[in-house]
Image (cartoon, helix red, strand yellow):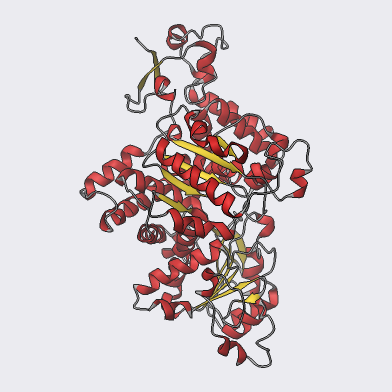
Amino acid sequence: MLTQVYNLQSDKDAIEVSLTGQMLLETPLLNKGSVFPEDERRALGLLGLLPYHVAPVKEQLTRTYENYCREDTDLGRYMYLASLHDRNEVLFYRLVLDHIREMSPIVYTPVVGLACQNYSHIYRRPRGLYISYPYRDEIEMLFQNVTNDQVRVIVVTDGERILGLGDLGVGGMDIPVGKLALYTLCAGIHPATTLPIMLDVGTDNRALLDDPLYLGWHHERVRGADNDAFIEAFVRAVQQRFPGVLLQWEDFAKKDARRLLERYRDKLCTFNDDIQGTGAVTLAGLLAAVDLTGSKLSEQRVVILGAGSAATGIAEQLIAVLASEGISPEEARRLIWLVDTQGLVHTGRRNLDVEKWLYAQPQELITAWQPVSSSEPVGLEEVVARVHPTILIGTAACANVFAESMVREMAKHVARPIIFPLSNPTSKCEARPEDLLAWTGGRALIATGSPFPDVTSQGQTYAIGQCNNMFIFPGVGLGVLASQAKRVTNEMFIAAARALSECSPARKNPTASLYPRIEDVREVSRRVALAVGLAAQQVGVADQTTPEELERRVTEQMWEPHYPRLLPRKD
């Protein structure tokens, strides 16, 4: 068991371990590689198992980065970092932190999508827990095979809606792995307290089912009551094995994402990052952008391409903040226009699900849009022309759909158009920042889901902010753990969004990014965690402490990747 070899409560500069020799070198959280000093090599049975030279940490980092730079493809770089993660976790986290702007897109979006697509062909070593449907009656036993008793954060997926790439089956496992790496990188959540989980209920991706190397269960995806019963059994097992754990749902299909969140949000400490995390990080950027325009959120007209988990999550948090400006939910919904694959969401459409119906615009309004017939779909371009939005957001993974004519039409009626093409990976982005700035004469306020370089337009250089959930969910998790919150509430995400918005560089420099530098993510996560912890106390899901005590707990929770001194256990 991990607790037998690594005591998280020990003095962080000296840890007693029960492993020695080759087994110690093959334990990623304890392995130091060439950095092991001679006295530890003698005491822990490592003499002769390592080259003679004892390398300083700086030398080890230099060598590792050189090897990383030898990889000439993004997938090769991903595989190199994954292998490093598997053999030396401290070195992995130290290296990525030192090069976080360069490497975070490799560890997570957009390159993780490519890794998920190729999962069964690049697979090297298991990480986490795979709960496959054929083992549905043995889930509790599977959890007993997790020998780590200190798990405090779980990220789980069923692989059905990976980024904008669709059903990738067991290949989706790299998403929880990547998300939990970001918990550690961005907020210092100790890697020994995290567990990625894959719910393998089959796949409807025919290419995967026909692939003889596919590592998942070769079966069409289980749906309906059978899938619900499977997930219920999974949740019960989580509660039994790790009571009080924070459970994050990740990349479930639209039809399941919100439904599962609503079913379990009051039964355990849980949230859905695609809904709440995306909503909060987008809200943070919008609050900063609206502030730059000198207007109020209640004065905006918002058009969102997409009506899935991300879109409704954004809308939900916008409505919550609008309430603080005295706007009723009904009035707030009239400011938000959702456009899905069938066009504008309005009350004249049949078979709208509950989430879409909440944001359906009145059919009478559509009928008045002559010569448009209310019986015909109202597309995005028509909505933009009619509504004159001040904010345009893309969440539908439709590449280049924000066309020049549409953006120019929007810019005719808005002094500072706010445009967020958020879809991942980069190949699914609704528009490129350089085009948006060119079409708006440099007036657009832009944030993207994938990383983009600075853009020079009209003689001015603009930093393009990445609306990246890594600015929100790690800090939320840190705040939950530090405050010992029993539930995750919408108020906690609103607090997270406001805290992130206050960190926006654009508030001080209008050509700067709407979002902080990736290099500052740890400080941002600390501020988010403090806001989340305070909000948890205010809504009654965490015990009251002084602000000073909460801050102490947050700081105490933030693990730094460094090599502790290792001592042989005395017993």
- Can you give x and y, in whole percent of width and height, for residue 16 in the image? 37, 17
Q: Of 137 and 37, which appears nearest the observer?
A: 137
Visible residue check, residue 472? no
In the rendered image, residue 332, in percent from the top left (x then y), is placed at 44, 77
- Front residue of 120/136: it is 136
Query: Does residue 485 appear left or right of residue 298 in this picture?
Result: left
Q: In which quarter of the image is residue 26?
A: top right
Quadrant of the drawing holding the C terminus: top left
In this rendered view, identify the residue nearer to me: 212 or 322: 212
Figure quadrant of residue 553: top left
Relative height, residue 265 to residue 132 (above, below): below
User: Above or below — where is 415 with respect to 521?
Assistant: below
Left or right of 20 in this view: 227: right
Q: How many labels sit on residues?
A: 0
Please, is residue 557 above or below residue 334 in the view?
above
Q: Which residue is drawn at 51% across and 11% down?
A: 21
- Quarter placement of the N terminus: top left
Q: Which residue is drawn at 45% across and 67% down?
A: 316
Q: Position of residue 395 (x, y in %)?
A: 59, 64
Q: At x 28% / y 45%, what residue is drawn?
A: 551
Horizontal and vertical percent position of residue 149: 41, 30
Nearer to the camera, 519 or 143: 143
